Image: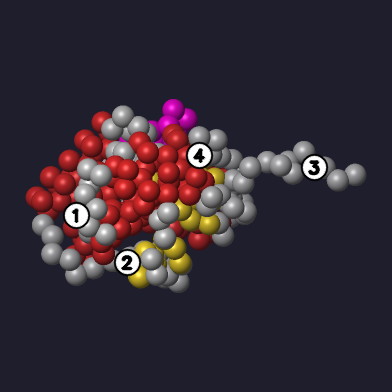
C-alpha cells in the first residue's frame, strides 16, 4: 500500500532573514545551490519596484499608483550561472541587476516597503516561489510573514560597523563610488525604518535560529546552518 500521509505536505522552505550586510543573500544562494532548491531574493522585488517607480516618474507619495505597479510588476529572475554573482534580474525585459544594488536604491526600496498595500500586493508573488523540491527565501519578513510555517528559520545579525565594511567591499568591487561613513548612516536609517514600520517590522521570528555573523566567515555560517538542516532532515549528513 502506498503511504500518502505526506502527499499534501507543503514544499520545504528555509528562510534567511536579517538586516542589510549580514550576508543573508550570499547564504541563501549557497543553500539553494547545495540543496538544489529554488531561490527567492525578496529584497530584490522591492528594489525592482523602487526602480520602476523612478523609471515611470511616479511620486513616492502616490501610494495608489505604486500599489498598482506592485500588483503588475513585470519582473523576471534568472540564474547567473556564477555563485559569486547576484541573480540576473529583468524589469520589463531590461536587465537591471546592477542598477538595483546601489545603496540609494536600497533606501528607496525600504520606503516602498513601508506601504501596507504594497507589501500585501507582493505577498502572493513571493509565496508563488514555493515550488518543489524546496525554497531558500532571503529577506526581512520571510519567517514572520511570508512563510510562517517554514521548516527552518534563520535570522542573521552583525554589528553595524562590520555590515558597513562588507557593503563597502561589495559595492567597490562592482565599481561603485561609496564611502564607509555614508554607508554607516544609510544602514542606520534603513535599520530604523525597517524595524519601526507598522507592517511586518524587521525582527526575528519567535522560533528563529539567531546567528551573529560579525566575526564569522561565510563558510563558518554555512557550516552552522548545515547542522541545523541536518537536524531537521532537510540535508543529508556528509
- Look at mark 3 in the image and give the residue it sits on: 4
Assign a secondary structure to mark 2.
loop
Q: Secondary structure at mark 4?
A: loop
Q: Give the x, y percent position of residue 202.
A: 33, 35
Which is in the foreground here, disc 2 or disc 4? 2
- Residue 85's place in the image compared with 12, above or below, is below
Placement of the C terminus among the 4 image quadrants = bottom right
Asked if disc 3 and disc 4 are in contact, CB closer than 8 Å, the reply is: no
Report the residue marked by disc 1: 104
Question: Which numbered disc flags the more N-terminal residue, 2 or 4?
Answer: 2
To which quarter of the image does residue 170 belong?
Answer: bottom left
The residue tagged 4 is: 147
Residue 118: x and y, percent?
36, 43
Circles 3, 2 touching at the beta carbon (< 8 Å): no
Return the mark for residue 96. 2
Element under disc 3: loop
**Bounds of the magenta segment:** 202-211
Q: Residues under labels 1 and 3: Cα distance?
A: 50 Å
Q: Is residue 48 left or right of residue 74?
A: left
- Nearer the camera: disc 3 or disc 2: 2
* Residue at x 54%, y 45% (from the top left corner): 13
Amino acid at each position: 500500500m502506498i503511504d500518502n500521509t505526506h502527499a499534501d505536505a507543503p514544499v520545504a522552505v528555509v528562510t534567511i532573514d536579517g538586516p542589510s550586510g549580514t550576508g543573508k543573500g550570499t547564504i541563501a544562494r549557497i543553500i539553494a545551490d547545495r540543496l538544489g532548491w529554488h531561490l527567492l531574493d525578496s529584497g530584490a522585488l522591492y528594489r525592482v519596484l523602487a526602480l520602476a517607480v523612478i523609471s515611470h516618474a511616479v511620486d513616492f507619495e502616490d501610494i495608489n499608483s505604486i500599489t498598482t505597479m506592485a500588483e503588475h510588476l513585470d519582473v523576471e529572475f534568472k540564474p547567473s550561472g556564477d555563485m559569486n554573482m547576484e541573480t540576473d534580474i529583468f524589469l520589463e525585459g531590461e536587465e537591471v541587476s546592477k542598477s538595483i544594488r546601489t545603496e540609494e536604491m536600497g533606501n528607496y526600496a525600504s520606503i516602498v516597503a513601508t506601504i501596507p498595500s504594497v507589501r500585501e500586493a507582493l505577498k502572493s508573488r513571493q509565496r508563488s516561489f514555493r515550488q518543489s523540491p524546496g525554497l531558500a527565501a532571503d529577506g526581512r519578513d520571510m519567517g514572520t510573514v511570508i512563510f510562517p510555517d517554514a521548516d527552518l528559520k534563520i535570522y542573521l545579525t552583525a554589528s553595524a560597523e562590520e555590515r558597513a565594511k562588507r557593503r563597502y567591499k561589495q559595492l567597490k568591487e562592482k565599481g561603485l563610488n561609496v564611502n564607509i561613513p555614508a554607508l554607516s548612516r544609510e544602514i542606520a536609517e534603513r535599520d530604523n525604518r525597517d524595524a519601526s514600520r507598522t507592517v511586518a517590522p524587521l525582527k526575528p521570528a519567535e522560533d528563529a535560529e539567531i546567528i551573529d555573523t560579525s566575526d564569522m566567515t561565510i563558510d563558518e555560517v554555512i557550516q552552522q546552518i548545515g547542522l541545523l538542516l541536518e537536524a531537521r532532515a532537510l540535508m543529508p549528513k556528509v
